[in-house]
Image: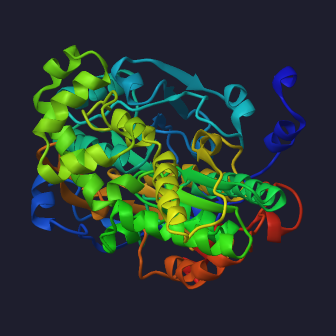
């Protein structure tokens, strides 16, 4: 281990995560308290029919009550999977699970299924021991048991899960994942109850995108660390831009379904431009509208002698632009209906000649107006569901090309006399496996302990949560919420399905309003903020700081 460890890793192994006071006590002094029955956020009638055994359960809270605890102390065998994309802190969830189980009973066991949900289906597992776990505490990544994107959603898969879990005498399964993974966890919990299998299912909220949150889940783990990593990189580039004074940097940031990362990084670094997909959709902005906005800022800065700047772009922007969303939907439908024939076409020219005549007039015009490279990306290999892989579309390059063309037009008309030298970047994988911030290290460890308490309380179909995250350990409150509480019915691939609703940027909430009030000033002036690297040691003002988004939301 020592040959592979940096000095920072060695120091991080020794870090002891802090717990909310209500779950830091001896377990025999922890009492589970329950509220009123809950309702889903929408489509309540349909969801009651789909989840007759788990719908409407109450919110759970853990209280510290000396000598009046309700946590059972028997031996527990628990399985755990990491599902979906990586997020900083996942290892600490598993550490919290392990320590919590051993605190319940020294003979309790934790089994990790390898490679995500498919590890259960293939019965591919490893036993997690203290020696095995030690090198992973407070580290980034999901490499302890690896992750996967297999969906658990069919009756056959659920039956196989039950068989494998029972073969290990497992009492409960913990699913660490995002909204889709936790939706599958809810379906599995319902199946196991319906078929009378004595196996509980508990979810943990994970995603750096920040789109798994609500009134009860204040933030998904990994968001804090990832945004701090990206903000450091943006701050570095901003410093370089203000030093060289000759480049415009277009930076695409992770976040396909929501623009939370872009918004948080804008609040952290104060760029000249930050596009928020939800605002683009709300205002029905076209590609031309967005291009004109970009060029307006570029021209005004150029007039002031600043031929440089920083523009932040959310990964999923193209799906928020009405004309692009319509185009992508038509392409997906055409390819779904003609998948076999399309696979026989060789080269982009044949593919384009097949697609274009089948598009509607407006979609065909949009497709033909795009740069060749973007057209090609729209027809690349599909994701497992047959859809365009939006993350592969170089949105930052598209906007650069459109801006260059527009600035050339303005130059011919004598309305732009400056220089535009663009650079493009995409920050994605850089943030997914970073060493977790103290915030995420603490939060994730608390989520793991909370999951154990939910299991010991006999609950299933719940998500572990910790509230009041801005108040420090003395004010935080750990508990659990029913997964069905976060659900609605959505159309997915032609079928109505129950899903946990994604949280988009709220244009009426304080984080966006704060950004909106400042962006004109940031556009014209050079006011870059430089957050620097994540701080693990030192004053609490550095090591304990959460995201600006969370601070504004909780004020």
* Residue 33 % position (x, y): 43, 70
* Residue 225 % position (x, y): 65, 53
The correct choice, above or below, for 334 with respect to 521 in the image is above
Q: Quadrant of residue 517?
A: bottom right
* Residue 194 % position (x, y): 16, 43
- Specify whether 552 is left or right of 194: right
- Specify whether 493 is left or right of 254: left
Residue plotted at (81% across, 71% down)? 541
* Residue 350 % position (x, y): 23, 22
**Toward the viewer: 237 or 456?**
237
**Toward the viewer: 284 or 263?**
284
Q: Is residue 155 visible?
A: no
Position of the C terminus by quadrant = bottom right
**Toward the viewer: 444 or 373?**
373
| Numbered marks: total | 0
- Specify whether 16 is left or right of 29: right
| Image colouring | rainbow
Residue plotted at (69% across, 48% down)? 436
**Toward the viewer: 264 or 442?**
264
């Amino acid at each position: 281990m020592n040959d592979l460890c940096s000095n920072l890793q060695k120091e991080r192994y020794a870090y002891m995560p802090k717990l909310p006071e209500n779950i830091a006590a001896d377990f025999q002094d922890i009492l589970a308290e329950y509220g009123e029955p809950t309702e889903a956020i929408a489509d309540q009638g349909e969801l009651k029919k789909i989840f007759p055994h788990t719908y409407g359960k109450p919110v759970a809270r853990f209280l510290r009550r000396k000598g009046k605890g309700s946590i059972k102390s028997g031996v527990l065998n628990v399985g755990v999977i990491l599902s979906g994309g990586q997020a900083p802190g996942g290892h600490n969830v598993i550490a919290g699970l392990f320590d919590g189980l051993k605190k319940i009973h020294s003979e309790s066991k934790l089994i990790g299924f390898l490679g995500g949900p498919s590890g259960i289906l293939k019965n591919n597992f490893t036993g997690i021991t203290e020696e095995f776990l030690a090198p992973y505490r407070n580290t980034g990544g999901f490499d302890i048991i690896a992750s996967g994107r297999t969906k658990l959603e069919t009756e056959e898969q659920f039956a196989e899960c039950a068989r494998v879990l029972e073969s290990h005498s497992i009492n409960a399964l913990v699913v660490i994942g995002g909204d889709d993974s936790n939706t599958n966890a809810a379906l599995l919990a319902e199946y196991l109850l319906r078929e009378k299998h004595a196996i509980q299912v508990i979810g943990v909220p994970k995603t750096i995108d920040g789109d798994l949150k609500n009134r009860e889940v204040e933030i998904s783990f990994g968001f804090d660390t990832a945004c701090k990593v990206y903000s450091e990189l943006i701050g570095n580039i901003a410093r370089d831009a203000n030093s060289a004074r000759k480049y415009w940097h277009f930076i695409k940031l992770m976040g396909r379904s929501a623009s939370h990362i872009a918004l948080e990084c804008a609040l952290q670094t104060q760029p000249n431009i930050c596009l928020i997909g939800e605002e683009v959709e709300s205002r029905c902005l076209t590609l031309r509208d967005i291009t004109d906005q970009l060029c307006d800022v570029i021209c005004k800065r150029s007039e002031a002698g600043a031929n440089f700047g920083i523009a932040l772009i959310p990964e999923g922007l193209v799906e928020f632009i009405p004309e692009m969303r319509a185009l992508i939907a038509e392409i997906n439908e055409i390819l779904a209906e003609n998948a076999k024939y399309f696979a026989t076409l060789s080269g982009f020219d044949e593919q384009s000649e097949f697609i274009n005549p089948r598009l509607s007039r407006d979609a065909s015009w949009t497709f033909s107006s795009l740069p060749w490279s973007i057209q090609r990306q729209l027809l690349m290999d599909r994701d497992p569901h047959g859809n365009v892989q939006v993350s592969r579309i170089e949105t930052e390059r598209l906007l650069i090309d459109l801006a260059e063309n527009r600035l050339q037009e303005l130059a011919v008309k004598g309305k732009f006399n400056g220089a535009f030298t663009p650079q493009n970047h995409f920050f994605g994988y850089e943030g997914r496996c970073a060493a977790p911030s103290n915030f995420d290290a603490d939060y994730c460890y608390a989520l793991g302990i909370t999951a154990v308490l939910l299991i010991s309380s006999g609950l299933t179909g719940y998500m572990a949560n910790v509230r009041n995250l801005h108040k420090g350990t003395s004010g935080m409150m750990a508990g659990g919420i029913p997964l069905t509480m976060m659900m609605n019915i959505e159309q997915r691939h032609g079928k109505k399905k129950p899903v946990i609703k994604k949280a988009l940027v709220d244009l009426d909430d304080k984080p966006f309003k704060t950004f909106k009030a400042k962006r004109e000033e940031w556009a014209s002036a050079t006011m870059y903020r430089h957050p620097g690297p994540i701080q693990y040691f030192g004053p609490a003002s550095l090591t304990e700081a959460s995201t600006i988004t969370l601070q504004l939301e909780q004020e």
